[in-house]
């Protein structure tokens, strides 16, 4: 991103500090409410009046003279009680926004940031709720990278938890398969994948729901779960071997699903390897020695190691705020292993994983994510994973309490700063209206009470939900129908490519357009609409700009590239004075993309960026309807107008890329 205003802010700050003695600690610089007042403004003279014993307007006038001499400033003026309003050199600004190469953002640092997201239990297919997590996490990664951070993307795999144990029980006890039978099940699924179908994750969708009912029919069967959990944690025995094979196959399916939306990962840390590398043993020893966890001799948590969290509610018993870290049977809870994992992410554990390429899956470009490995099965040398300065954990709001426990664990071990830099990126769930759920899953059996709800919660154990792949398939099918209606002469392969790009844009934008504290009730028709606040609407605005350029190049007997190169040198001053304001409003809006990107990261409200992209697309559409490029008879005006349009389109395309919304060649 080219940060037009950030560099100007720096120039203004230096000019103010060099003009005033002693220099102010803070030089506030803001956007005026109306671009007509200026592009940037500083009210610093108001705060300096007392220390300098001068009228604010007198101070502002002195600052104005200094600021106006800055090379990128066209003019500056004093306004109101002591504001200095600054106007940028508009021709130079447009030329810079159209520059071939981007400059590194002014806020770029070498700080390493770890973003952990997706984290789907490897026991069945991903559902639509998982898509919001992955899209939020991936968009945060894109934003942080664009702002100059070094970002590592982690996808934690809970391959020793209850969900995997239940699938293993379903295969071995309920379905009565032996190890060879499980291997054949996986082989058949792989063959189906090779033919363009879905993998074993879809096979396990209904099996996982059915094993829940199987347990309910006879609670003595829960003994199988307890036994399998122990085997998974020890990493030995038939159940452990089956669990590893199934988990690896399901993870490969999840990665394939996410790649359909442009989502990738650097490393897959596995819970089994936290145990096999004795990370938990090291973490537990520290927690015990620091009295961060205590052993309970009596009460409902007797025999457990617990962490007691502070509470303020009058009359509440301490037990209500005790989180079990180690169960009475010796198995470790998820939050216990997560404390050890968080220590590793910050480089505080004094130990490391082994790593190897994740063999069951390769991205389209042939690269593979790395996975952790058991001791002795891979080179011990770390590829540099972990050791983050800041860690974002993208997990829904239902996990807020557990994230609090993890941070409290860091605090009690003396890592207060790291606890503050351990950030829970929380969000509300994705749901479906009963009507939409039945449209996508006619086989769902809903109670009368469920049919009356405004939305339905996902429940893997009940089989209530929609597979992510099924939703993406349906979106692509609907988008293909639209593409075929608009472009009947396109080759089939190109139509399918466009449909995938439109579907991906529709889904990602819909997941991002709502505030993260808002429950998203996904609606296919609303997401795919070409009008309104949607991904396709934003995509179409950019496609129309490209079409204008192509038409003008053809009319001039030129190439698109040479035309774009020529208008880079167009002068904004060639636009008639009475029209300049409207033209500059579009440039001014486009130039605010870096500020919006920073705001989205600082607040973790990514809907801010989605809304900006929509507003910019609206502004572009309104501009080329009001000020046609192709019909402009004066060449200098036409070139300047096209430069304005291309500068805005560049910002739109960059904004959409940050959102992970593809940019189709046509629509």
Image: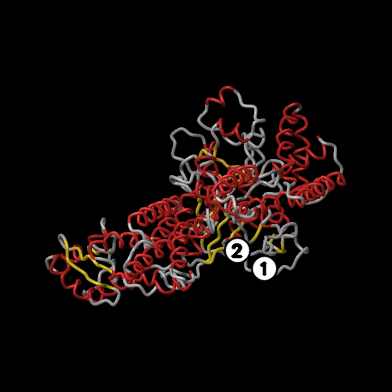
Residue 295 shows up from this direction: no
Residue 51 shows up from this direction: yes
**Relative side of 561 to 266, left or right:** left
The answer to whether the residues at label 2 and label 1 have Cβ atoms under 8 Å apart is yes
Around disc 1, counting alpha carbons within 10 Å, would you say few (fewer than 14), some (14 to 19), or many (20 or more)? few
Question: Residue at the spot x=76%, y=27% of the render?
Answer: 218
- In what quadrant of the picture does the N terminus appear? bottom left
Instruction: Give whichever of 466, 240 is nearer the camera.
Output: 466
**Relative side of 163 to 57, left or right:** right
* Residue 266 % position (x, y): 63, 61
Question: Residue at the spot x=65%, y=30% of the render?
Answer: 444
* Residue 279 % position (x, y): 67, 57
* Residue 384 % position (x, y): 62, 68
Label 2, label 1: how many angstroms apart (C-alpha)?
Answer: 9 Å
Secondary structure under the numbered disc 2 in the rendered image: loop
Around disc 2, counting alpha carbons within 10 Å, would you say few (fewer than 14), some (14 to 19), or many (20 or more)? many
Q: Is residue 506 above or below residue 555?
A: above
* Residue placed under numbered mark 1 in the picture: 382
Instruction: Give whichever of 620, 380 is nearer the camera.
Output: 620
* Residue 144 % position (x, y): 49, 62
Indicate the quadrant where residue 468 lies. top right
Question: Residue at the spot x=46%, y=41% of the render?
Answer: 518
Indicate the quadrant where residue 75 lies. bottom left
* Residue placed under numbered mark 2 in the picture: 386
Instruction: Give whichever of 79, 516 is nearer the camera.
Output: 79
């Amino acid at each position: 991103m080219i940060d037009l205003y950030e560099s100007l802010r720096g120039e203004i700050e230096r000019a103010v500090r060099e003009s005033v003695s002693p220099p102010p600690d803070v030089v506030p610089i803001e956007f005026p409410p109306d671009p007509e007042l200026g592009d940037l403004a500083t009210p610093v003279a108001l705060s300096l009046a007392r220390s300098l014993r001068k009228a604010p307007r007198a101070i502002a006038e002195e600052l104005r003279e200094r600021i106006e001499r800055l090379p990128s400033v066209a003019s500056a003026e004093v306004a109101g009680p002591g504001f200095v309003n600054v106007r940028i050199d508009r021709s130079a600004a447009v030329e810079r926004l159209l520059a071939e190469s981007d400059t590194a953002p002014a806020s770029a640092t070498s700080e390493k940031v770890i973003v952990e997201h997706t984290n789907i239990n490897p026991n069945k297919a991903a559902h639509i709720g998982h898509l919001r997590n992955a899209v939020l996490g991936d968009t945060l990664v894109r934003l942080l990278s664009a702002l100059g951070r070094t970002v590592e993307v982690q996808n934690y795999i809970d391959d020793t938890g209850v969900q995997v144990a239940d699938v293993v029980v379903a295969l071995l006890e309920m379905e009565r398969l032996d190890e060879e039978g499980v291997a054949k099940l996986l082989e058949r699924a792989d063959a189906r994948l090779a033919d363009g179908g879905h993998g074993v994750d879809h096979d396990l969708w209904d099996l996982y729901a059915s094993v829940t009912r199987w347990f309910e029919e006879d609670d003595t069967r829960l003994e199988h779960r307890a036994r399998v959990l122990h085997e998974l944690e020890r990493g030995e025995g038939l159940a452990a071997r089956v669990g590893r094979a199934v988990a690896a196959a399901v993870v490969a399916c999840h990665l394939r699903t996410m790649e359909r939306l442009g989502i990738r990962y650097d490393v897959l840390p596995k819970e089994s390897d936290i145990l096999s590398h004795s990370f938990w043993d090291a973490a537990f020893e520290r927690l015990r020695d620091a009295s961060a966890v205590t052993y309970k001799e009596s009460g409902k948590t007797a025999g457990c190691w617990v962490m007691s969290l502070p509470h303020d509610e009058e009359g509440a018993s301490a037990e209500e705020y005790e989180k079990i870290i180690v169960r009475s049977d010796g198995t470790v809870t998820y939050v216990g292993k997560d404390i050890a994992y968080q220590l590793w992410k910050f480089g505080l554990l004094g130990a490391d994983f082994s790593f190897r390429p994740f063999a069951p899956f390769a991205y389209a470009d042939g690269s593979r994510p790395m996975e952790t490995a058991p001791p002795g099965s891979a080179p011990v040398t770390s590829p540099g994973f972990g050791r983050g300065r800041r860690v974002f954990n993208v997990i829904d709001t239902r996990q807020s309490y557990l994230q609090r426990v993890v941070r409290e664990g860091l605090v009690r071990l003396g890592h207060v700063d790291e606890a503050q830099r351990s950030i829970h990126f929380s969000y509300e769930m994705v749901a479906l209206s009963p009507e939409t759920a039945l449209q996508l899953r006619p086989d769902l059996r809903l109670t009368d009470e469920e049919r009356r709800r405004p939305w339905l919660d996902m429940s893997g154990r009940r089989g209530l939900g929609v597979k992510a792949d099924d939703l993406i398939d349906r979106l692509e099918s609907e988008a293909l129908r639209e593409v075929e209606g608009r472009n009947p002469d396109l080759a089939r392969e190109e139509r399918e490519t466009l449909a995938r790009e439109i579907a991906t844009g529709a889904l990602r934008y819909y997941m991002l357009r709502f505030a993260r504290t808002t429950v998203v009730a996904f609606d296919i028709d609303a997401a795919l609409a070409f009008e309104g606040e949607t991904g396709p609407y934003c995509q179409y605005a950019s496609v129309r700009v490209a079409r204008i350029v192509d038409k003008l190049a053809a009319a001039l007997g030129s190439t698109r590239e040479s035309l774009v190169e020529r208008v880079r040198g167009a002068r904004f001053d060639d636009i008639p004075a009475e029209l300049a304001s409207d033209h500059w409003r579009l440039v001014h809006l486009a130039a605010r993309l870096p500020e919006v990107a920073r705001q989205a990261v600082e607040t973790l409200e990514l809907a801010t960026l989605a809304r900006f992209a929509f507003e910019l697309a609206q502004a572009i559409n309104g501009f080329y309807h009001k000020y046609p490029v192709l019909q402009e008879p004066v060449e200098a005006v036409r070139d300047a107008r096209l430069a304005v349009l291309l500068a805005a389109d560049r910002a739109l395309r960059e904004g959409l890329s940050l959102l992970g919304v593809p940019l189709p060649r046509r629509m």
